[in-house]
Image (spheres, rainbow, N blue to C red):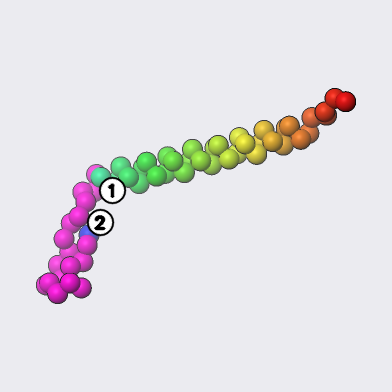
Amino acid sequence: MKRWSGTAGFDGRPAPVASSRLTNAIAASLALGALTLCLVVAVTVLSSNITMATAIPA
């Protein structure tokens, strides 16, 4: 990730604001969170479908 400082009146060279290891760690944690969220939604939908398919005894 690089920030362009040229818009603030400087010479326009990019200044690093985060290391590549930190960027990769953040990307990996976001991907893992998205996968976990998808799995939770899938399990919720499947369990609600199973619940609706079972007969309710009267």
Residue type marked 2 = Met
Q: Position of residue 41 (x, y in %)?
A: 58, 40
Of mark 1 and mark 2, the one earlier in the sequence is: 2
The residue that mark 1 highlights is: 23
Residue beneath the point at 25% across and 45% down:
22
Q: Residues within 10 Å of mark 2 (few under 14, many from 20)?
A: few
Residue sticking out furthest to the top: 57
Label 1: which secondary element: helix
In which quadrant will I find the C terminus?
A: top right
Q: Camera-side residue: 24 or 17?
A: 17
Queried whether the magenta region covers residue 15, the answer comes back as: yes
The residue that mark 2 highlights is: 1
Image: magenta residue range: 3-21
Residue type marked 1 = Thr
Queried whether the magenta region covers residue 33, the answer comes back as: no
Residue beneath the point at 78% across and 34% down:
53
Is 33 rendered above or below residue 10? above
Is 26 rendered above or below residue 16? above
Residue sticking out furthest to the right: 58
Question: Given contact means CB atoms under 8 Å apart, are the residues at marks 1 and 2 in contact?
Answer: yes
Q: Position of residue 33 (x, y in %)?
A: 44, 41
Q: Quadrant of residue 3?
A: bottom left
Q: Position of residue 19 (x, y in %)?
A: 21, 49
Q: Residues within 10 Å of mark 1 (few under 14, many from 20)?
A: few
Identify the mark at residue 15; answer none if there is no mark: none
Q: Is residue 52 left or right of residue 41?
A: right
